[in-house]
Image (spheres, helix red, strand yellow):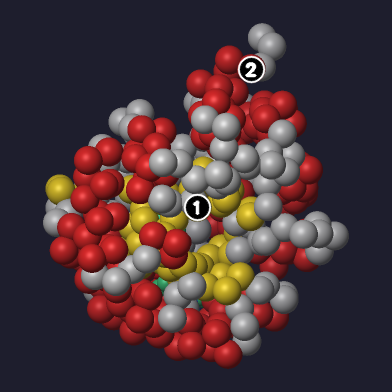
Amino acid sequence: GLPASVRIHEVGARDGLQNEKAVVPTEIKAEFIHRLAEAGLTTIEATSFVHPKWVPQLADAERLFPLLDDIEGVALPVLVPNERGLDRALALGADRIAVFASATESFAKANLNRTVDESLGMFAPVVARAKEQRVHVRGYLSMCFGDPWEGAVPVHQVVRVAKSLMDLGCDELSLGDTIGVATPAHVRSLLAALNEEGVPTSAIGVHFHDTYGQALANTLAALQHGVTTVDASAGGLGGCPYAKSATGNLATEDLVWMLQGLGIDTGVDLGRLTATSVWLAERLGRPSPSRTVRALSPD
Ligand code: HMG
Ligand code: MG
């Protein structure tokens, strides 16, 4: 069976904009996030409190986050890699954070300048302090299916890091197919292995990049397994600057089109969302890669 409703975790403002060559003005980011909220998205990842030299595109987090204060009833999680990032996020009143681990050593090194275990050690005090403050913690896990340097990633290797993230106290896990190589049977095997090791499906979200056009098929496989949290980015923006061959995320519009057809409730107004992606694409100077955005927008 399929779930009755799905929570979309919108990542366009973070995963999308972190990967743009040009730095998007803070005011445009703020307007983008307001428009996403008006389109009915209820979880909108806003930015990252990472090192500004590592991701200059999001170096304006301190200026952006207060511009979102008037948005009500919407969760606005932010990425935090370490205690310095947590301090910055807490100082602005963030009440949802995400730490981000890797299933592979190569990407842990490239993205966090740490081994996998060193990065878990870096997250431990972050998660502990966040929990003390009743801050909700998402644990991202990248390279769950394949890695650009290491190739296919064994399921047991992913399960080990996933369990470590849960043991640190993460409230939810997001399984990242950072470079978009997963296919549905692989998704089913990983979900089953996680369940077997005691990670419940209710704690699992999926985060598919669409490099090979498999994101929607993978999402359907996850829904059939009982997953109800799906990450997507408006207009299909996205990618990770530290993962070669990462392209955009599953487009939120493509996801909403499929979910509507399946009769699954999302609360998203597809017309308003598409208009937002078209508006942003004009500012970025190139068309959205989303098939649904292109199909629904006048030429
Ligand atoms: P490092 O160079 O090892 O940093 O980077 P460090 O811990 O040695 O600290 C060096 C200096 O940086 C210190 O300053 C710190 O204070 C400062 P100094 O004492 O020398 O003057 N510093 C900071 N400043 C501001 N904010 C901070 C911060 N941390 C340290 N938070 C670090 C380690 C983790 C900081 C760095 O590697 C980093 O920022 N990485 C972030 C990379 C990133 O954001 N990648 C994209 C997000 S992940 C993703 O996209 C995948 C995902 O979508 C899921 C998927 O698709 O798979 C989530
Ligand atoms: Mg991503």
Q: Amino acid at mark 1?
A: Thr
Closer to us: 233 or 24: 233
Residue 66 in the image: state x and y as whole percent: 78, 65
The answer to which quarter of the image holds residue 269 is: top right
The answer to which quarter of the image holds residue 259 is: top right
- Identified at 56% across, 83% down, the residue is 130
Mark closest to the chain's N terminus, 2 or 1: 1
Residue 296, numbered circle: 2
Viewport quadrant of the N terminus: top left
Residue 125 in the image: state x and y as whole percent: 45, 88
Which label sits in the foreground, 2 or 1? 1
Closer to us: 129 or 266: 266
Q: How many marks?
A: 2
Closer to us: 13 or 274: 274
Q: Amino acid at mark 2?
A: Leu
- Identified at 39% across, 60% down, the residue is 201
| On screen, residue 258 above or below 142 | above
- Identified at 45% across, 75% down, the residue is 170
Residue 195 in the image: state x and y as whole percent: 29, 63
- Identified at 21% across, 50% down, the residue is 189
Closer to us: 181 or 50: 181
Q: Residues within 10 Å of mark 2 (few under 14, many from 20)?
A: few
| On screen, residue 228 above or below 238 | below
Name the secondary structure under disc 1. strand
